[in-house]
Image: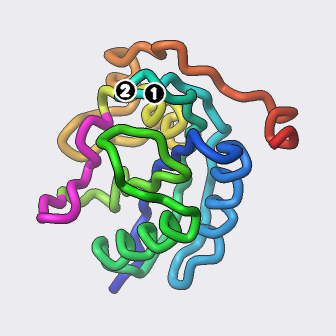
Amino acid sequence: MSEQTVFIGLGSNLDQPVSRVLQAIHTLESLPDCSLQARSSLYRSAPMGPQDQPDYVNAVVQLTTRLLPEDLLDRLQQVERAHGRRRERRWGPRTLDLDILLYGDRDIASERLQVPHPGLAQRSFVLYPLAEIAGDLRVPGLGRMQALLEQCPRDGLLRLPESALHAG
C-alpha cells in the first residue's frame, strides 16, 4: 500500500492528562509503518459529554503510514488499552482517546470506522489543533479548514503554554 497522510486526535482527562498525551505522541512516533510528521500544541477543553468530569487535554498529530485504515485503528486501540482505557460511559472520562480524524482524502464508512471523524467540524478541540499543523487543509466532504474554523467557536478552548508541558 502507498503511504498515506493521516491526522490523529488525542485526548485525556484522567491520570495526569498532559503526561498521558505526551506519552501517547511518543508512542505514535514509534509505531511500525508510521512516521510522525507534525504535532500541535496541547489544548485544554471542557468535557463534551457529562460535565461531572475533569477538563480534557487535547492535541492532533500528523502521521504518514502504510497501514490500512482498520489496521491503524487496531494499533491505536492497542495504545489506548496500554494506557488503561476502559469504555464505560459514552463521552465519559478516559485516560486516553485516539481518533483517526482524516486518512488521506478518503471517505470511510464501515462498521468500525468513520472518516472524516463524525463531528470533526463542530469540535473546537479538534479543529483548532488540526488547523495549527494543517491550516490550508481541505477536509473531504466538509471544505476548507478556514471556513470550518469560522463556523466553530473556540468554546473556552485554551492553548496550553510550553511551561505546562513540563508540569505533568
Sort mark 1 into few (<14), some (14-19) or many (20+) by Cα contacts within 10 Å. some
Tell me what residue is drawn at x 42 percent, y 81 percent. 66
Tell me, yes or no, whether the two marked residues, 1 and 2, touch with CB atoms within 8 Å.
yes
Instruction: Determine whether 168 is above or below 155 in the image.
Output: below
Residue 116 belongs to magenta span: yes
Q: Main secondary structure of the magenta part?
A: loop
**Residue 16: quadrant of the picture:** top right
What is the count of numbered marks? 2
Residue type (three-letter) at the residue carrying disc 2? Pro
Residue with the mark numbered 2: 50
The colouring scheme, among rainbow, by chain, secondary structure or one colour, is rainbow
- Of residues 8 and 139, which is closer to you in this image? 8
- Which element type, helix, strand or loop, lies under badge 2? loop
Q: Would residue 145 be found to the left or right of residue 158 on screen?
A: left
Residue type (three-letter) at the residue carrying disc 1? Pro
Q: Position of residue 18 (x, y in %)?
A: 70, 43
**Tag nearer the camera, 1 or 2:** 2
Q: Position of residue 59 (x, y in %)?
A: 57, 43
Q: Which residues are magenta?
A: 108-120
Tell me what residue is drawn at x 49 percent, y 68 percent. 81
Q: Which mark is residue 28?
A: none
Q: Which mark is residue 47?
A: 1
Q: Position of residue 2 (x, y in %)?
A: 37, 81
Tell me what residue is drawn at x 56 percent, y 44 percent. 12
- Distance from the alpha carbon under mark 1 to that under mark 2: 7 Å
Q: Would residue 134 be found to the left or right of residue 89 on screen?
A: right
**Residue 165: quadrant of the picture:** top right
Instruction: Determine whether 65 is above or below 127 in the image.
Output: below
Q: Quadrant of the N terminus?
A: bottom left
Tell me what residue is drawn at x 43 percent, y 26 percent. 124
- Which element type, helix, strand or loop, lies under badge 1? loop
Instruction: Determine whether 64 is above or below 159 in the image.
Output: below
